[in-house]
Amino acid sequence: MADDTNVVSDEAAQRRAARKAARAAILPPERNISFDHLSLEDLRALRTELMDQETRVSYWRRIIQARLDVLRSDVTDHSPVTDLAKVLTEATSAHRRLAHISVLPIDDIPPLPDLAEVWARQVAPGDTVATAKLVTDLESAEEQLSKFRSELFRGIDVATNELIARYREQPLLALQILPTDPFA
């Protein structure tokens, strides 16, 4: 039994050492000349705006995915409340997606021009052609949102790397975001 414990302990130590070596091998970010025109405040604002956009896009993706879950569910009573209740109680993946939805203003503008129309479109119960068309349109919107979200993540990563590079050059810059009086 003690041998088993030592083997597990040795394996864990080897994994920790491998992770540490992998982290040490990562090169620090370098400055990107395309951000030279931005002040540190502007760069932080850009990153914040990209993160806010990603939150909005993620919100729309999640509600589209929930609507798709409803349309794809095998529900005999097709009232929207019954459909949604059934999907949310039975589909754990939908529950995980909806668990972290931020509440956004009602007048929030969707990132795709036709998203509001697709979202608001109603189909009559039993109209398989209209339902299939709506599913196709929602899937297309979800795909477009996913691509846009990936681009936002790339932008966030680039802006973050630029911030890290600037902080590495001048570590005191990182202190500027701290409150001057932490007890205020």
Image: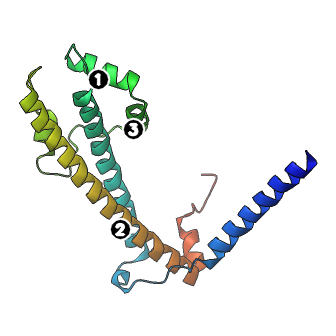
Q: Measuring 52% from the left and 74% from the top, which residue is drawn there?
A: 164
* 3D distance between C-alphas at marks 2 and 1: 35 Å
Look at mark 1 in the image and give the residue it sits on. 84
Q: Quadrant of the N terminus?
A: top right
Say what secondary structure mark 1 lies in. Answer: helix
Say whether disc 3 or disc 1 marks the residue closer to the N-terminus.
1
Q: Nearer the viewer, residue 36 or 112?
A: 112
Q: Estimate how packed mark 3 is, as few (under 14), some (14 to 19) or many (20 or more) residues with alpha carbons within 10 Å.
A: some
Using residue 134 as the reference point, say whether residue 84 is left or right of it: right
Query: Residue 22's quadrant in the figure?
Result: bottom right
Look at 39% across and 28% down and name the residue there: 91
Nearer the viewer's eye, disc 2 or disc 1?
A: 1
- Which mark is first along the chain, 1 or 2? 1
Choose top left, top right, bottom left or bottom right for residue 11: bottom right
Quick check: 115 above or below 6? above
Task: Report which residue position mark 3 lands on.
Answer: 97
Q: Farthest bottom residue?
A: 33
Instruction: Identify the element where label 3 is drawn.
Output: helix
Q: Label 2 is placed on what type of residue?
A: Gly
Q: Position of residue 131 (x, y in %)?
A: 12, 31
The residue pinned by badge 2 equals: 155
**Residue 124 to residue 51: above or below:** above
